[in-house]
Image (spheres, rainbow, N blue to C red):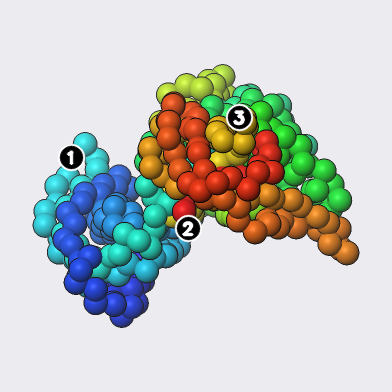
Amino acid sequence: MLKHFLKSLVLFSSLLLINEAFAAWYETEGSAKIQNGDVVQARTKAIEEALRQAMLESGAFVSTNQNMTNGILDDDELTIASNNNFNQYTLVSEKREKGYLTVKIRLYIDSDPKQCIGMNYKKNILPVLFTYANNQHQETQTGLNGFNKSLTLKFQQFLSSTNELNVIPYYNQNLGIDLANHSHRNSNHMMQSIDQLAINKDAQYIVFGVIRDINLHPSTLNWFSKAMGNKEREFSLEIFVYDTITKEILFSNNYKTKAQWDIDENNTNTDSEYFWQSEYGENILEKLTSAAKSVSHTLVCKKPVGRILKVENNSQYHINLGKINNIKQGNRFLIEHSNNFNDKNGIRRFQKNQAKTPMVVTDVYNNTAVLKPITQSNGNVQINDHAYIE
């Protein structure tokens, strides 16, 4: 694993583009739990976390895909997607405390802040209650009552801990969203319902998940576990992020893990610390952390798109972005009509018309802002038109 990680570092370093005007040193920390006494694994994961922090601070975004089995990392893929590049990093310090290993690194990054203007603004995102893929995963058959609600709430909390998103409290209704089991026609109807939900909740992005597996299986750990009849519980969760403006799925990934199931059958309350501090619960939390970071990094460079809420005398236009999105007086917007159509295959497509009169922000409130035309308005700006940050 460490060899794989170092190969990734070599690959990223080879992409170096010297731009001294924006070059800078970053010093960040990362930590990881020491699983089964494996310090090397913990160090690698801690360094990855420190690298993520440094790259994110410089305007990059990083995603990982990790599979855990009983605390052991099956595979580890680190992807840094950015026009920013790093030349070298130095391990400054390392300490162990309470079962965790924490490292501090110093990293040299060439970055151009113009490449990621969107990171200056928070995007409105709404999680929707996670659903089950099919009946065999229903909580009544697995003994994990309320698991999807607890899982959704945990994921919402991890999303809220990121700096790029304004997370709206999750929608506590089971919409049964599973793109893998919908036809184009059904998907179009479903997406229209989601679009209306986004308007009602004032969100641009909708994030939803499908729980594909939480079943018990005979243990595969070792002969002793098999002989004792120990069980393992699987976990598989697919996460999707939908952009209600472009009508596109921007992100999807399946997060899997499993662990020995040693929780008392009479104490499976998925809201309890007992559950989440178990090996199974901790593995899931690690997956949720990774998923939240990947969603955040997918959206970090996206500019939030406003929606026209109110038109006053064709001279003032209220939009649904405000201080919570880091909108400020003087920000410039272009107003555009947007519409959707179904192609010959029944697939829903998005298009937008040519930009209209440029606008400037004159007043900002918590979740709204007022725009005025910079030049004489050409009129015809309508409620629900979109406002794009220049």
For discs 3 and 2, the disc positioned in front in the rendered view: 3
Left or right relative to 245: residue 359: left
In depth, the one of 373 and 68 nearer the eye is: 373
Could you tell me the amino acid type at mark 3? Answer: Glu
Q: Are marks 3 and 1 in contact (CB under 8 Å)?
A: no
Q: Callout 3: helix, strand or loop?
A: strand
User: Disc 1 versus disc 2: distance between alpha carbons?
Assistant: 26 Å
User: Disc 3 versus disc 2: distance between alpha carbons?
Assistant: 49 Å
Please name the residue shown 62% across and 36% down the image. Answer: 314
Q: In the drawing, what numbered circle is on residue 312?
A: 3
Image location (x, y in percent) of residue 119: 39, 50
For discs 1 and 2, the disc positioned in front in the rendered view: 2
* Residue holding disc 1: 97
Q: Callout 2: helix, strand or loop?
A: strand
Left or right relative to 182: residue 64: left
Image location (x, y in percent) of residue 249: 64, 53
Looking at marks 1 and 2 on the same chain, the residue that comes earlier in the sequence is marked by 2
Image location (x, y in percent) of residue 359: 50, 45
Q: Is residue 262 above or below residue 61?
A: above
Left or right relative to 288: residue 61: left
Please name the residue shown 74% across and 50% down the image. Answer: 339
On-image quarter of the N terminus: bottom left
Q: Are marks 3 and 2 in contact (CB under 8 Å)?
A: no
Looking at marks 3 and 1 on the same chain, the residue that comes earlier in the sequence is marked by 1
Q: Callout 1: helix, strand or loop?
A: strand
Q: Are marks 1 and 2 in contact (CB under 8 Å)?
A: no
Q: Is residue 342 visible?
A: yes
In depth, the one of 354 and 10 nearer the eye is: 354
Q: Residue furthest bottom?
A: 14
Q: In the drawing, what numbered circle is on residue 65?
A: 2
In depth, the one of 170 and 237 nearer the eye is: 170
